[in-house]
Image (cartoon, rainbow, N blue to C red):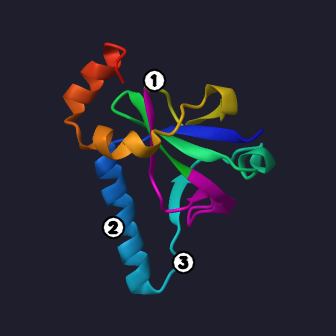
Amino acid sequence: MPLHLIKLAVGCESVKELKGWVAERMATARKKGLPLRHIHVTRMTPKRDEELLAGGSLYWVIKGEIAAREKLIAIEPFRDKDGIGRCRLVMQPKVIAVSPRPMRPFQGWRYLTEDGAPADLGKSAAVVASMPEPMRRELRDLGLL
């Protein structure tokens, strides 16, 4: 059973905006001739990397709810120019909307078990993603989404 990570998408307002960020980074990578992979740098390196890379994803918390995920494909520890240990979380550049679920703020990242991870929205993702954010949140709070 794969293990996942969960992280706050600080400054991101919606799944649509997250998809835009990823698309922008891929366009920049394409122009520079770099591999098309989405990278997020963190301070701490996950110790359970084998479990994470066995099908795990990085779930994004956007505006107080788990809203999307990207499949993890590599975890690359490194030292920055100041000698501080960091970690690149390398993901497939495909944002997948998930069934929204409230999540309190936290620092850094957390592990998320398979049974605790929300399901992908699937075919309804386009409809839900096109809804205005306040409407989608209200429908979720009413248990209709």
- Report the residue at 33% width, 67% height from top: 24
Looking at this rendering, what residue extends furthest in the front direction? Answer: 123
For badge 1, the amino acid type reads Met
Q: Is residue 82 magenta?
A: yes
Q: Residues within 10 Å of mark 1 (few under 14, many from 20)?
A: some
The foreground one among 88 and 64 is 64
Front-most of 37 and 41? Answer: 37
Give the residue at mark 1. Answer: 103
Location of residue 26 (image quadrant)? bottom left
- Classify 10 Å Cα crowding around label 3: few (below 14), some (14-19), many (20 and above): few
What residue appears at the point 37 percent right and 27 percent down from the top-left corner? Answer: 64
User: Local crowd at mark 2 within 10 Å, few (<14), some, or many (≥20)?
Assistant: few
Residue plotted at (56% across, 67% down): 81
Name which residue type carries label 3: Pro
Place of residue 73 in the rendered image (x, y in percent of width and height, measured from the top left): 65, 60
Dominant secondary structure, magenta: strand
Mark 1 element type: loop
Give the residues in magenta: 71-100
Q: Which residue, given by chain and number where applicable, does mark 2 sit on? A: 24
Q: Secondary structure at mark 3?
A: loop
- Taking the image as shown, residue 63 lies to the left or right of residue 117, namely left
Q: CA distance from mark 1 to mark 2?
A: 27 Å
Tell me the tag on residue 35. 3
| 99 over 70 or under it: above or below | above
Are the two marked residues, 2 and 3, in contact with CB atoms closer than 8 angstroms?
Answer: no
Of pointers 1 and 2, the one earlier in the residue sequence? 2
Q: Residue furthest top?
A: 142
Residue 12 appears anywhere in the view: no
Where is residue 101? Give x, y as percent: 44, 25
How far apart, in angstroms, are the residues tagged by discs 2 and 3? 14 Å
